[in-house]
Amino acid sequence: MPLRLHDLRPNPGARKRRKRVGRGNASGKGTYSGRGLKGQRSRAGRDYNAVFEGGGMSMMRTLPRRGGFKNRNRVEYQPINVVELARRFEPGAAVDAEALVQARLLRRASQPFKILAGGSIEHALHLRAERVSAAARAKIEAAGGTVEVIDATSADSSGSD
């Protein structure tokens, strides 16, 4: 038996009948018909804006004053102090993003991080990072280490060629 256009029916429960209000109390939606008592919203024929809030300043207009500005393009750097580097790495070790992931100071190698000057460091490390504070650089170099600042944007663009 071929399927014809007039044989098509929607799935059971896909189409629901409109609730008919104001058809007497026996219908379950009589008397006030779900509108409550009195007031602007109970009246017939009164059309109002969906965001109208009784004449006060609407929530939509007050929202810009509440939250402040959130920069969508903000880059959140993971702070790492030099004392953590001193604890987790041997003297003369090469410290980069992969090494920091191995040392569990970063979750993943692509996560941006910045080396800060918290604590002290006594032994030399060879550091490669996107961001290093001036005080952290001074502490690492004073301990005999080297600091190489890499440009993250050029590293990303060179990998996409």
Image: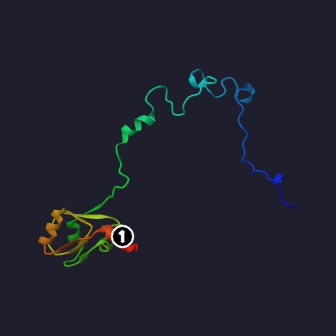
Q: Quadrant of residue 20?
A: top right
In the depicted structure, whether residue 99 falls above or below residue 49 = below
Which residue appears farthest toward the front when viewing the image? 161
Toward the left, the furthest residue is 142
Circle 1 packing at 10 Å, graded few (<14), some (14-19), many (20+), is few
| The quarter of the displayed image where residue 88 is located | bottom left
Q: Nearer the viewer, residue 15 or 154?
A: 154
Provide the residue designation for mark 1. Answer: 156
Disc 1 element: helix
In this rendering, would 53 be left or right of 2? Answer: left
Q: Nearer the viewer, residue 123 or 49?
A: 49
Q: Position of residue 158 (x, y in %)?
A: 36, 73
> Horizontally, is 58 left or right of 134 in the view?
right
Which quarter of the image is occupied by the N terminus?
Answer: bottom right
Q: Amino acid at mark 1?
A: Asp
Residue positioned 72% across, 25% down in the render: 25
Which image quadrant: the C terminus? bottom left
- Residue at the spot 40% in from the left edge and 72% down from the top edge: 160
Whether residue 46 is situated above or below residue 3 in the rendered picture: above
Residue lying furthest top? 38
For residue 104, say whether it is visible: no
The answer to which image quadrant residue 68 occupies is top left
Please say whether residue 114 is visible from this viewpoint.
Answer: yes
